[in-house]
Image (cartoon, rainbow, N blue to C red):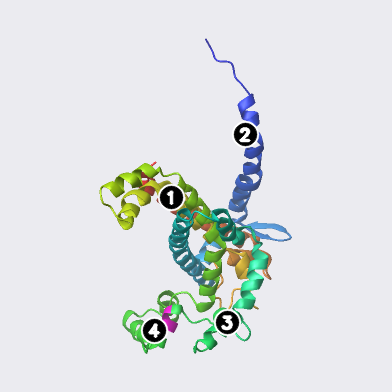
Amino acid sequence: MKKKFDIVPYLYILPAALIIIVFRLIPIILSFIVSFYEWTITGPGAFIGLENYEIMVKDGEFWQSLLNTFYLVIFVVPTSLILSLIFANFLNGIEKLKSFFRSIYFVPTVTSMVAISIVWKIIFNQQTGLVNFFLMNLGFDPMGWLAESRGVFDLFLSNIGVNFQAFINSLANITEISYNTLYMILGGPSQALFSIIIVTIWKGLGYNTIIYLAGLQNIPNVYYEAAEIDGAGKIKQFFKITWHLISPTTFYVLMMTTIITFQVFSQIYLMTGPPVGGPLGTTKVIVYFLFDKGFGESNNLSYASAIALVLFGIILSLTLLQKRLEKKVHY
């Protein structure tokens, strides 16, 4: 007997499907089309094929923004995972005021990024900021923070007496790679970008902590009781029980934190500049670079669309790569 078609289940998913189609799928298709034309804010122009992508490959500013973005992701994602897991373990271990502490940790997540950026910009101010105030009281020299373009590895090694710039210069002579390129790669994120990294970690810490806390609370106590009977200590219990049973939570937090970090924009726009993305472009990440090309002075929407598609491809590739880690997840 032929089964009768039932439209009701499709009506349930229709609102969500429309949102995905209108605000996700159609913009991706339009960006793909626009990237092959001369397209400004006033409208479409001539068909130019792959010219935007050829320009992108030769654009040093694009590669710097991409490197800045990877620095952001490399520092934010693992640090956020480690700290949120530590705080979640702390919250899971306390008995009194658990709801209070959970709310305190979650406050940055629900606070406007605009407000957070303005407050942290004041905190990092070179002349009047709280960070330099405490550093000077501890006997240290004030630091540039959002105004410093030197890499954090360079700054650290210089403070312990290592001439990092001389090392880069000698390496440039050996490899015949330009000094600026080598310094940009090996010098690490600028101190200004490192300040953005601190804010980004702090902003997302509460959400990841609550997610980890939910994962920890889903682990049955019988596993820990059995481990204690066998003589396993707290550290061994963590690596043999907790770490394996929260792997689905870790997998989710890893994927979401990576995607969100690649899309960082507001704190760059509000905390750096003028010009935004400074100093010397060391905080200009790929999303701000995309925005600047599309809606800045050039109004080059076709080039911005090409950049957006490359960013989409990078995030998609990393997501698929992370999906391969799912075989190590214990559900």
- Residue at 42%, 74% in the rendered image: 185
Q: Which mark is residue 82?
A: none
* Label 3 neighbour load within 10 Å: few <14, some 14-19, many 20+: many
Q: Earlier in the sequence, mark 4 or mark 2?
A: 2
Of labels 2 and 3, earlier in sequence is 2
Residue 244: x and y, percent?
35, 48
Which element is circle 3 on? Answer: helix
Between marks 4 and 3, how big is the CA–CA gap?
19 Å
As drawn, the label of residue 157 is 4
| Residue 13 - label | 2
CA gap between label 1 and label 3 equals 36 Å
Magenta includes 8?
no
The residue identified by callout 1 is 251
Give the residue type at disc 2.
Ile
Point out the stretch of residues depicted in magenta. Answer: 153-157
* Residue 327 vertical placement versus 164 (above, below): above
* Position in image of residue 93 (x %, y %): 45, 55
Residues at marks 1 and 4, CA–CA distance in whole angstroms: 35 Å
Where residue 227 appears, as percent x and y from the top left, is 30, 47
Q: Earlier in the sequence, mark 2 or mark 1?
A: 2
Above/below status of 187 relative to 227: below
Q: Which residue position is annotated with label 3?
A: 147
- Seen at 49% across and 53% down, the residue is 95
